[in-house]
């Protein structure tokens, strides 16, 4: 080993995962925020000086810091202060309404009750709550509850009144406002929710920064050191960019963050572009990433745009948020401006629309390494995968959707269509780098259900969906590390533990490679998270 300075921190005596090609070693030395050396404990001995901290892994595994390639960091932090109505907390309609009633009893009249995470498939009544039921629970407060997928919401009568929505309100293109027998139910989808979202009070600047910090610390607790916030501007427009800058400047940005700018009719791209905020601007802690375009909704909500109808509803193929011409124009414009694109497309018809638009943009301005992305990319065909390879377009999926929503998919789609969803093995064998992520707060940022599903393809109820798509533990770790770095265009500095790369490390409570999937899901935790060589999280003993 060449003459090197004394390390700041050495981790040794446990499996150290370097990367998919590099495999494992048993020690790593960190210095000045970078990886200094890797090897055996004997190799590290000359690097130990009077100020070196040595951590004995004692058989525990160290990996590169995890890269959460697609979540909504700021919204996650905001929802952590909202009413949590996920199935883990409530599975009956009466219980959900009681939670809203209790929140309303503590609130001032006219104060908004915001809640997130219900899944009508998991409720005892197997349907969405109705506007009038929310009225009874909170007669003096506007109520707005968001389904787990984030693409469907229910508002009560007061919320609809404040938004100016009634039975005569035109339905926006790319959205839905449900009526039954000419009466509003309160259920809205996609762009149909815009009128209500516009009248929900904006968070203060301090609340935005606090949300970033709160969600970032939560991510640290799972070994996550880098994230992409997948739609900056979605709640408070350009103020969210300012909040991120404030968080970084004041030391309240706990994770390295790539800001994916919201595009489209409600987006902030024009202002960002005028300010020079294009893909790649920024530094290792806070940078500008791709532009986000929404093309469809969610499969569980029957709003993902499909080429074939949903099961039992021959008239329903989902919702396109944009026409082909609108999608083509936006994509070409953003591509010409130099942006990477991260397009939300779940259904195969939405994926086809996305690929057509991206190919047109690449034909206009060839760039073989732009690395446009399809976020979620849930229900794609073999032909679409081959096309993605040819165009250099990467999928950014959430395997945890199978864990959380797989049984729901089987209730709205034929089994063979569900079997083809989120094909991690096919993507990797085709040469793509599917970066695992959670889409939090759609799913929890907790990494273990995601890893469990990559290893087993099991839902939370134990249903196995396309077992031929399972990954090895090394592939699953890489999907959460180097693949995330690759799709976020920083693979030369993050995602692997090699000399000169960022000293971002996650230490887990056991050797992940020898544990069963069930042990990983139920009995494993992150013990320590290190960013730039500094410990930012340590679990209680």
Image (cartoon, grey):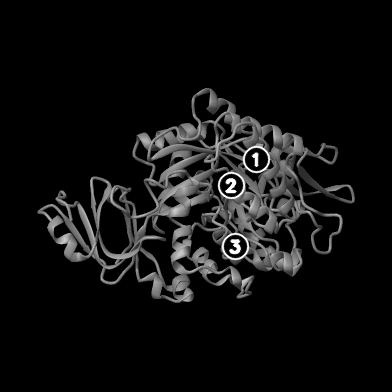
**C-alpha separation, residue under disc 1 versus residue under disc 3:** 22 Å
Q: Quadrant of the rendered structure where residue 249 is? A: top left
Quadrant of the image containing the N terminus: bottom left
Image point (60%, 29%), residue name: 336
Mark on residue 393?
Answer: 2
**Residue 255 position in % (x across, y down):** 40, 47
Q: Is residue 323 left or right of residue 403?
A: right
Looking at the image, tell me whether mark 2 or mark 1 is earlier in sequence order.
1
Q: Is residue 81 left or right of residue 526?
A: right
Pointer 3: what residue?
426
| Contact? badges 2 and 1 (CB < 8 Å) | yes
**Residue 198 position in % (x across, y down):** 66, 35
Pointer 1: what residue?
358
Q: Is residue 62 left or right of residue 520?
A: left
**C-alpha separation, residue under disc 2 versus residue under disc 1:** 9 Å
**C-alpha separation, residue under disc 3 versus residue under disc 2:** 15 Å
Mark on residue 271?
Answer: none
């Amino acid at each position: 080993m060449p003459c090197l300075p004394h390390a700041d921190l050495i981790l040794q005596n446990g499996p150290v995962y370097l990367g998919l090609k590099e495999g494992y070693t048993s020690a790593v030395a960190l210095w000045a925020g970078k990886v200094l050396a890797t090897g055996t404990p004997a190799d590290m001995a000359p690097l130990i000086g009077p100020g070196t901290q040595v951590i004995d892994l004692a058989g525990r595994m160290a990996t590169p810091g995890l890269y959460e390639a697609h979540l909504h960091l700021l919204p996650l932090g905001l929802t952590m202060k909202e009413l949590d109505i996920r199935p883990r907390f409530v599975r009956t309609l009466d219980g959900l309404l009681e939670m809203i009633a209790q929140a309303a009893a503590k609130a001032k009249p006219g104060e908004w009750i915001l809640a997130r995470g219900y899944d009508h498939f998991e409720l005892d009544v197997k349907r969405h709550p109705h506007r009038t039921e929310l009225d009874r629970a909170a007669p003096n407060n506007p109520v707005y509850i968001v389904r787990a997928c984030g693409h469907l919401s229910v508002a009560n009568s007061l919320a609809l009144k404040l938004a100016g929505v009634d039975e005569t309100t035109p339905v926006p293109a790319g959205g839905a406002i449900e009526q039954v027998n000419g009466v509003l139910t309160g259920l809205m989808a996609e762009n149909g929710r815009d009128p209500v979202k516009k009248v929900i009070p904006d968070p203060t600047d301090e609340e935005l920064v606090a949300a970033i910090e709160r969600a970032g610390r939560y991510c640290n607790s799972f070994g996550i050191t880098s994230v992409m916030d997948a739609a900056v501007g979605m709640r408070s427009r350009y103020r969210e960019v300012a909040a991120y800058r404030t968080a970084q400047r004041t030391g309240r940005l706990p994770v390295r963050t790539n800001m994916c700018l919201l595009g489209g009719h409600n987006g902030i791209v024009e202002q960002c572009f005028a300010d020079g905020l294009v893909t790649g601007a920024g530094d290792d802690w806070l940078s500008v990433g791709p532009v986000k375009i929404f093309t469809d909704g969610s499969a569980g909500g029957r709003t993902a745009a499909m080429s074939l109808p949903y099961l039992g509803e021959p008239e329903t193929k989902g919702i396109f948020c944009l026409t082909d011409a609108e999608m083509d124009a936006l994509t070409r414009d953003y591509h010409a401006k130099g942006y990477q694109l991260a397009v939300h497309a779940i259904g195969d018809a939405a994926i086809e629309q996305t690929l057509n638009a991206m190919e047109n943009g690449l034909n206009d301005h060839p760039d073989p390494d732009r690395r446009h992305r399809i976020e979620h990319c849930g229900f794609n065909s073999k032909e679409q995968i081959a096309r993605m390879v040819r165009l250099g377009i990467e999928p950014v999926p959430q395997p945890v959707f199978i864990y959380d929503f797989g049984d729901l998919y089987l209730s709205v789609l034929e089994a063979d269509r569900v079997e083809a969803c989120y094909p991690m093995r096919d993507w990797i064998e085709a040469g793509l780098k599917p970066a695992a992520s959670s889409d939090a707060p759609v799913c929890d940022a907790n990494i273990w259900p995601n890893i469990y599903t990559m290893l087993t393809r099991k839902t939370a109820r134990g249903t196995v969906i396309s077992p031929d798509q399972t990954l090895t533990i090394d592939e699953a770790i890489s999907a959460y590390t180097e693949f995330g770095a690759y799709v976020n265009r920083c693979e030369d500095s993050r995602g692997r533990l090699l000399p000169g790369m960022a000293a971002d490390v996650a230490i887990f409570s056991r050797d992940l490679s020898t544990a069963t999937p069930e042990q990983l899901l139920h009995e494993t935790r992150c013990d320590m998270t290190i960013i730039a060589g500094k410990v930012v999280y340590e679990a209680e003993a």
